[in-house]
Image (cartoon, rainbow, N blue to C red):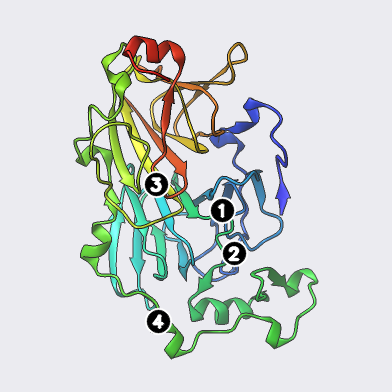
Amino acid sequence: MTSASNTLHTLAERVVRKADYVPCAEAFVDTRLPGREGKMNYCIIGPGVAENEKQVVNIVEPHGFNVGGVSLPTGKINSLHSHVTAEVFIIFRGEWRFFWGYDGKDGEAILKPGDVISIPTGTFRAFESVGSDDNFMLSFLGEDDPGFVTWANDVIEGAAEFGFYLRHDSSLVDVNNGDVMPQASDLMQPLSEAELLKYNRTSLAEMQARVYNVDQFQGHAEAFRDVALDGGKKLYHSLIGEGCHELGEIQARVLNPHSFSLGAIVAETGNGFLRHKYDVKQVLVVGEGQWKITMGADGEEESFEVGPEDTISVPAGMYRRIENIGDERGVLYVASSGDLHAGISWAPEVGDSLGVSV
């Protein structure tokens, strides 16, 4: 795949604004099927499972998980498919109908901005834009190498009628664009009935239990020590995994391993995190509001003002300060690499104010 940033030389390259996301209109084998036109795929951190070598990746540095995005014209569908690693969506704009099961009939749910959903691994899923054409979802895929997409049989069969095929290595073959047609043994084939029956059947109640929205839950007001200091007040929401909180027995909404944990903080103007660092890589995604992210070694800090849908990669062991600089409350999603609890360390001046050793 083509990379927009093979090596990160500056902190500025770790800030990927939504204006920097590069769409690919034919990232997957289903994009030529009727009703699938206009799907745009984005690879923000890592290559994800894009099947087209023309897909641009903003940051290729491994993080332990991948971050991407998708937008669809109203009424268009992303076809039924399954992944071998975890997949999580955050809805930013528009309304989306998710439906699942190898035949798409196990259940459906309408998700709106602020909803976060974790799809069980090994479950066929699809989604349709049912709101405005102005829509966008962010997606997280587990592991550095999330493997490949397994498509429903009608996708494999239908795409062939439009000259699109998939090799076993998940690379696209476009005979209309001059690609040589491989042997049938080199191409992905439809699944047998016995193979289809091995995939999960997930009930509506089970899927609803994997949806979270910060507006519908109270959050934890004392998950971090710095809430006792000016500028540190915030609510912490534990969505997926062990999380990155410091205090309290906090159980996430979704507990099964994803290769990353996902939390969210909600803070009013002038609040967020005082200067701290983590022992793992983190990715920050702005859900609502305007934020200032200051990161870097002592004397070499740089500050970046970011807004909704912007993505920031923060290296392990690097100090950072996070502040809501908008006029209203802000929501910031925090993804931490790994399935273990992420440990926080406060900067010396913060530790002194808290009366704790650092």
Q: How packed is label 4: few (under 14 Cα within 10 Å), some, or many (20 or more)?
A: few
Residues at marks 1 and 2, CA–CA distance in whole angstroms: 9 Å
Q: Earlier in the sequence, mark 3 or mark 4?
A: 3
Dot 2: what SS?
A: loop
Residue that carries the numbered disc 3 in the rendered image: 90
1 and 4 marks in contact (CB < 8 Å): no
Do the CB atoms of the residues marked 1 and 2 lie less than 8 Å apart? yes
> Of the residues tagged 1 and 3, which is closer to the observer?
3
> Image check: 128 left or right of 18?
left
Discs 1/4, front: 4
The residue located at (61%, 80%) in the rendering is 188
Describe the element under mark 1 as helix, strand or loop.
Answer: strand
Instruction: Locate residue 242, reporting x and y percent.
Output: 35, 45
User: What mark, if any, has residue 198 been given in the picture?
Assistant: 4
**Horizontal arrangement in the rendering, residue 339 relative to residue 63 (left or right):** left
Between marks 3 and 4 in the image, the one whose residue lies nearer the viewer: 4
* Rendered location of residue 110, percent (x, y): 29, 56
Q: Measured from the top left, where is residue 277 in percent x and y?
A: 48, 27
Q: Residues within 10 Å of mark 2 (few under 14, many from 20)?
A: many
Residue at 70% over, 82% down: 186
Check residue 41 in the rendering and tell me which mark sits there, or answer none: 1
Q: Nearer the viewer, residue 309 or 33?
A: 309
Q: Is residue 268 above or below residue 195?
A: above
Q: Is residue 244 something one can see in this rendering?
A: yes
From the top left corner, tell me how far across and down residue 209 is, in percent: 24, 57
Between the residue at mark 3 and the residue at mark 4, the CA separation in whole angstroms equals 28 Å
SS at circle 3: strand
**Quadrant into which the C terminus falls:** top left
In the shown orientation, is residue 146 left or right of residue 206?
A: right
Mark 1 and mark 4: span between their CA atoms? 28 Å
At label 3, counting other C-alpha atoms closer than 10 Å, the crowd grade (few under 14, some 14-19, many 20 or more) is many
Q: Quadrant of residue 50?
A: bottom right
